[in-house]
Amino acid sequence: MRNMPLPDALNYQFLLRESLIAVVHQDHQLASVAGESIAVRQLENEPFIF
């Protein structure tokens, strides 16, 4: 689910929590920050595949 408030009438249970991982081509401008965290804001204009 997306990180948003859930309706009060919805019962839920966390099953697991996973990190978001960005995979880019070696020539992409964000590839140079390997080993460092990328802020989600840096990905705002990038196409996503889920």
Image (cartoon, rainbow, N blue to C red):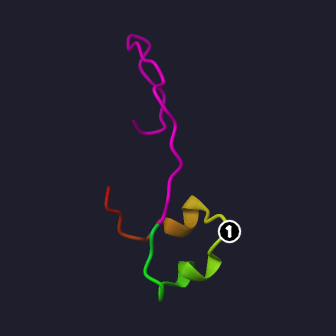
**For residue 32, above or below residue 3:** below
Q: Residue at x 45, y 18 (%)?
A: 13
Residue 40 percent location from the top left of the image? 55, 60
Residue 31 percent location from the top left of the image? 55, 80
Specify whether residue 18 is painted magenta: yes
Residue 42 percent location from the top left of the image? 56, 69
Residue farthest along the left direction in this orientation: 49
| Kind of residue at badge 1 | Glu
Q: Residue at x 38, y 10 (%)?
A: 9
**For residue 1, above or below residue 21:** above
Specify whether residue 37 is painted magenta: no
Q: Which residue has dot 1 on it?
A: 36
Main secondary structure found in the magenta portion: loop
Q: Which residues are magenta?
A: 1-22
Which secondary structure, mark 1?
loop
* Crowdedness near tag 1: few (<14), some (14–19) or many (≥20) residues, C-alpha within 10 Å: few
Q: Residue at x 56, y 63 (%)?
A: 41
Quarter where residue 50 is shown: bottom left
Count of numbered circles in the view = 1
Residue farthest along the right direction in this orientation: 36
Quick one: quadrant of the N terminus? top left
Residue 11 percent location from the top left of the image? 40, 12
Work out whether residue 21 or residue 43 is closer to the camera in this orientation and state it. 21
